[in-house]
Amino acid sequence: MRGRNLEARKHLEAARSLGSTAVDRLLLTEGLILAVERKHLEAAVVLRDVLKRSPSGEECDHALFALGFVLHQAGQDKPAMEVFEEAVQRFPQSPWLPAVREQIEHIKNPQPDHTH
């Protein structure tokens, strides 16, 4: 999420061309790239695909955080909160939990004049 989407796209395409079997990781990367490009609804589709393909996969906690983030950015706070709450319930030890909790707090207590 550091704005390096062009570099990430090159790495993503290279991994795909080599036939990488880490499909979940590649889809998560694609979803994150779309989020950086502010294509939030497209990112949500890709991230939902990651979660559907591998509901208990290695990248699931990160995918849930990213999905909640892009839904919030797209103005869909209710579905975003549902995703964040799922992440808290399913992955209480996740390294993404602080970011999830920060987003929950952000949605519950937005700053005045806050928009996306």
Image: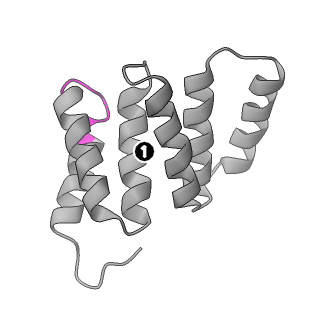
Left or right: 42 with respect to 105?
right
**Residue 107 visible in the shown view:** yes
**Mark 1 falls on what kind of element?**
helix
Quadrant position of the C terminus in the picture: bottom left
Residue 18 in magenta stretch: no
**Residue 2 visible in the shown view:** no
Q: Nearer the viewer, residue 52 or 68?
A: 52
Amino acid type, mark 1: Ala
On screen, residue 93 above or below 76: above
Q: Give the magenta range.
A: 91-98
User: What residue did someone put label 1 on?
Assistant: 66
Left or right: 91 with respect to 53?
left
Residue 94 in magenta stretch: yes
Q: List x then y, in percent, for residue 78.
A: 25, 61
Point out the residue furthest to the right here.
17
Q: List x then y, in percent, for residue 90.
A: 22, 28
